[in-house]
């Protein structure tokens, strides 16, 4: 009898010892997580550090999301991968996607990350260029058919430039920097905070003539989803955006950590150059039309302006309404632009 009692006590103690483990297993954060792919617009660089931070801090797991951050190969490709449901979410240039969205690509922006464009003419300081007007009589390296070249006529018109006195030198995208470094052109069309820092890093001081500062702004990076996801799983979008908003809110106190997470993956990136690019990129998260708008909010006027420019200068045809391309329905309400 005593033997049975001893065995019973031993079993009871074993069960009690295992209960914490059982509870821990039941609460395992890796259980019941929804796997989500988030395709970037390009190879991992400064704009993507914030998402690595959010994942590292556990914000996406807290929302029941197993986030897989994937490198991209251009915004149009990212949009297409979201449209064919290869990826759940995509970070992409809205201005690049609007023409194909207008033709029926079934995606929509559920958040706008950088409503202020970095599109610019980046001029060698020794060329004497200080304003857009100074470009008359100069040579600019450009790439035929890219989005910035197609926006250029709007800049010319808005600033009364004499386009016949500005020589556009057409080269491959990869050749714009070498061409300007070697002095074969006085400037290039690109992105402030990107090519400009590369040129400075090579010992060539430059002046950034940002189109948004000269009255021509088009939307930059937003977060896009398939229209079917909006209908079938709106809760996933809300959870993803809550985690994304927390990631951006946590960026300032964790800035060095965010950049280090990126460098740990892309070891070839120069830390000082990355910081300069990051400082420039994250300074453009306010809308030029509504500076007080909440984080990630799609400002209607920003979309209207972008569509107006693209209708006029990128040959968008038909009855195109800006509000068809975005929604704010899934953004966190607290602290948002309402």
Image: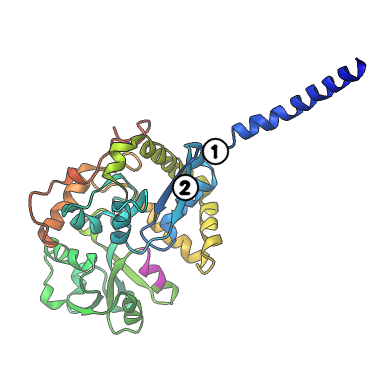
Instruction: Tell me, yes or no, if residue 36 can be seen here.
Output: yes
Question: Residue 131 sits in which quadrant?
Answer: bottom left
Residues at circles 1 and 2 in contact by the CB criterion of under 8 Å: no
The residue carrying mark 1 is: 31
Task: Pick the quarter of the image with the C terminus.
Answer: top left
The residue carrying mark 2 is: 67
Q: Earlier in the sequence, mark 1 or mark 2?
A: 1
Instruction: Determine the residue located farthest toward the left in the rendered image.
Output: 318
* Residue 121 covered by magenta stretch: no
> What residue is shown at x 21% (from left), y 42% (from top)?
300
Pick the residue in front: 161 or 70: 70
Q: Image height check: is 191 above or below 55?
A: below
Coloration mode? rainbow
Element under disc 2: strand
Instruction: Tell me, yes or no, if residue 292 can be seen here.
Output: no
* Residue 196 covered by magenta stretch: yes
Magenta part of the protein: which range?
A: 193-198
Q: Image height check: is 69 above or below 274?
A: above
């Amino acid at each position: 009898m005593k033997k049975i009692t001893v065995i019973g006590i031993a079993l009871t103690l074993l069960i009690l010892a295992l209960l914490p483990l059982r509870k821990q297993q039941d609460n395992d954060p890796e259980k019941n997580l929804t796997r989500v792919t988030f395709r970037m617009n390009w190879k991992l660089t400064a704009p993507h550090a914030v998402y690595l931070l959010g994942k590292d801090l556990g914000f996406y797991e807290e929302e029941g999301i197993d986030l897989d951050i994937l490198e991209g190969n251009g915004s149009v490709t990212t949009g297409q991968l979201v449209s064919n449901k290869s990826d759940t979410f995509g970070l992409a240039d809205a201005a690049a996607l609007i023409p194909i969205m207008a033709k029926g690509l079934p995606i929509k922006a559920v958040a706008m990350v950088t409503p202020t464009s970095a599109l610019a003419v980046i001029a060698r300081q020794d060329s004497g260029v200080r304003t857009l007007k100074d470009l008359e009589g100069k040579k600019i390296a450009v790439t035929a058919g890219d989005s910035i070249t197609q926006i250029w006529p709007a800049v010319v018109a808005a600033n009364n430039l004499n386009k016949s006195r500005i020589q556009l030198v057409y080269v491959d995208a990869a050749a714009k920097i070498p061409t300007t470094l070697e002095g074969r052109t006085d400037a290039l069309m690109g992105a402030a905070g990107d090519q400009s820092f590369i040129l400075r890093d090579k010992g060539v001081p430059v002046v950034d003539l940002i189109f948004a500062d000269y009255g021509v702004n088009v939307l930059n990076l937003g977060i896009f989803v398939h229209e079917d996801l909006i209908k079938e799983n709106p809760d996933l979008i809300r959870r993803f955006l809550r985690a994304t908003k927390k990631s951006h809110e946590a960026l300032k106190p964790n800035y060095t950590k965010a950049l280090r997470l990126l460098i740990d993956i892309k070891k070839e990136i120069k830390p000082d150059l990355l910081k300069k690019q990051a400082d420039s990129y994250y300074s453009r998260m306010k809308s030029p039309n509504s500076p007080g708008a909440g984080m990630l909010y799609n400002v209607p006027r920003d979309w209207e302006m972008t569509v107006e420019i693209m209708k006029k200068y990128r040959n968008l045809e038909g009855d195109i309404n800006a509000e068809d391309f975005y929604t704010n329905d899934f953004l966190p309400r607290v602290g948002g632009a309402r």
